[in-house]
Amino acid sequence: MERTERTRSSPSRRRLLKNAALAAGPYALLPAPRVGAQPPAPDYPLGTWEPASPANYTAGERTEDRPLDLVVIHVTQTSYSNALAVFQHPRKKVSAHYVVRSGDGHVAQCVREHDIAWHAGDWDHNLRSIGIEHEGWVDRPGYFTDVMYERSAQLASTICTRHGIPKDRAHIIGHYEVPGTDHTDPGPNWDWSRYIRLVNAA
Ligand SMILES: [Zn+2]
């Protein structure tokens, strides 16, 4: 993700105040999330459905001439719960299809796979990819737990199988590999060889 962290530092004071007022509003009243409180994810029943605001993705059918051929790996640079809150906030203009939690590998689906999440920072890449966010920070390898690797790889494997995406490094890419991006995630601490091995073993 990263983008929201950076854009937060630069907008006008008016917008900052507006965002602060919105952030202090409904979210402060929400109860703590309960395991099993959410319905199953529509495309991945092992996860839960935690939908992003429709203002933060493009609803639409993917066409035959623009098939899905990439999975993009991200790191949230914020907590799992805050990532979901950002995606649910209608003014954040960012989303990903999935978020994987560090501590237990839990998978939340936030955008349906036939809809186009805004995660890659590049329209062409958004059109052709599924985005998976991982709770953590690029410079804190402790967040990249065994269970998060395993559950994410299981998820990525089913995405690749369902859409006919090869399970290799040419098709499972980091956000940093999207042309023109200045994002670094998932960063040097992400173990790519392990991840690709797990995707193929899942
Ligand atoms: Zn990213």
Image (cartoon, rainbow, N blue to C red):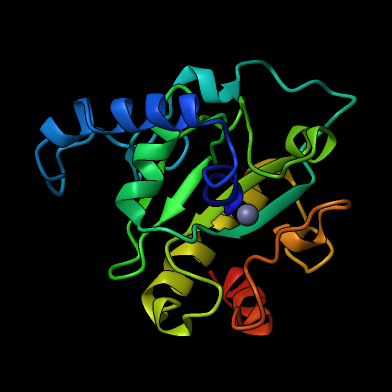
Q: Residue 108, position in %: x, y?
A: 37, 46
* Camera-nearest residue between 164 and 54: 54
**Vertical comparison of 60 with 177: above or below:** above
Picture quadrant of residue 146: bottom left
From what the image shows, is residue 186 above or below residue 2? below
Look at 75% across and 62% down and name the residue there: 176
Give the percent coordinates (x, y) of residue 118. Answer: 64, 34
Picture layout, residue 135 above or below residue 146: above
Q: Position of residue 173 (x, y in %)?
A: 75, 61
Q: Taking the image as drawn, is residue 184 in sight?
A: yes
Q: In which quarter of the image is ligand 1?
A: bottom right
Q: Work out which residue is located at the far front of the displayed protein and give it.
A: 13
Which residue appears at 58% of the width and 33% of the height? 113
Q: How many marks?
A: 0
Residue toward you, 54 or 17: 17
Relative to 63, does residue 108 appear above or below in the rendering?
A: below
182 horizontally vs 73: left or right: right
| Rendered residue at 30%/36% (across/down) | 40
Write down the quadrant of residue 157 in the picture: bottom right
Q: Position of residue 78 (x, y in %)?
A: 42, 58
Question: Is there any visible trace of residue 174 in the rendered image?
Answer: no
